[in-house]
Image (spheres, grey):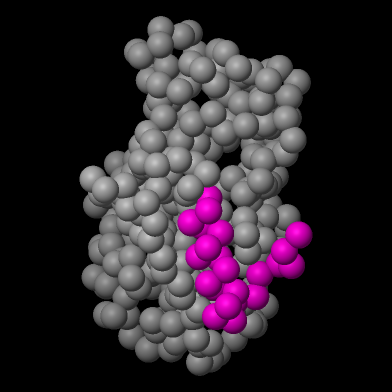
Amino acid sequence: MVIATRESRLALWQAEHVKALLQSQLGWQVELLGMTTQGDQILDRSLSKVGGKGLFVKELETALADGRADLAVHSLKDVPMDLPEGFALACVMEREDPRDAFVSNSFERLSDLPEGAVVGTSSLRRQVLLRALRPDLRIMPLRGNLDTRLRKLDEGHYQAIVLAAAGLKRLGLGPRIRSIFDEADMLPAAGQGALGIEVRADRHDMIEGLASLAHMPSWLAVTAERAVSRAMGGSCSMPLAAFTRGTGADGQLWLDAAWGDPGDLGDEVRQAAPRPHAPLVRARQSAPVQTLAQASELGEQVAAQLRAGGAQGMPLA
């Protein structure tokens, strides 16, 4: 079996992780097909300006379609909400820490930063949430793989950066984390911290085999989160967060979401002086969830609450 993967250090770790599980649990012989995607090549503009997160998966899907690869391993928050026709999400694996991490060489937490400090992130979600917490900060663009972002911090371009805790922990970079944001302050992105495996929809052999790697609580959680984004017409050009607080013994799933007015967010404006933030629109709901369909329904209900509260998504079909 051949795994299509991006060639960043984190993507290769993820692919090697899946390879090891397939070899040890299923006895498969597995090779990696490393690829460079458009998302890896375009580093001078934000994803919202050049086509969105699909730029990270398009080349991998082409390899699946033409038979060069049998499966692709993705960080699920980089996967568009709707897969192209002919492709399927075979499974979602057990989720790593879904929260955001505060990384700085001089400060322990966001509240310690001085007024006007420069914080790096190119995530519109993180921008609106940071602006709500600290409207005095200067939020500057930050693209590149994990090592590149840390190098830019170390070179003094930023006083702090915000990264996904999962990636840092997977690469053994946990000591770089100064503090972890509480989900109430920095609500994570839909699917953050989870790995998904994509295959061609007609590869029933792959779907059946990969079922053993699925972690259903994680799959239910990210399905609800991604349903919020799908119902809002979400993409990386929309400042949207969605996060579930796991199912208990009763199967109850709590889903929180937040939408921020993108306002003047963008590469050109983020370098200007800080301005007061627009209020966030928040929604929260719970429901007993035992199936993927029920998880999707919960996400759609929370999206409807966001719209009722004034959130402006893409027009509904």
Q: Nearer the viewer, residue 85 or 237?
A: 85
- Image quarter of residue 170: top left
Question: Looking at the image, which residue is at 41% across and 30% down?
Answer: 214
- Image quarter of residue 17: top left
Residue 155 in view in this figure: no
Magenta-span inclusion, residue 261: no
Question: Looking at the image, which residue is at 58% across and 24% down?
Answer: 71
Magenta-span inclusion, residue 315: yes
In which quadrant will I find the C terminus? bottom right
Q: Nearer the viewer, residue 105 or 250?
A: 250
Residue 14 in view in this figure: yes
Picture coordinates of residue 228 (x, y %)? 55, 59
Q: Nearer the viewer, residue 279 or 59?
A: 279
Question: Looking at the image, which residue is at 63% across and 48% down?
Answer: 80
Count the marks: how many? Answer: 0
Most extreme residue toward the bottom is 276
Does residue 86 lie above or below 142 as drawn? above
Question: Looking at the image, which residue is at 58% across and 78% down?
Answer: 308
Does residue 257 lie above or below 218 as drawn? below
Picture coordinates of residue 278 (x, y %)? 53, 87
Picture coordinates of residue 307 (x, y %)? 60, 74
Does residue 125 lie above or below 198 as drawn? below
In which quadrant will I find the N terminus? top right
Does residue 273 lie above or below 125 as drawn? below
Picture coordinates of residue 60 (x, y %)? 66, 32
The magenta stretch spans which residues? 296-317
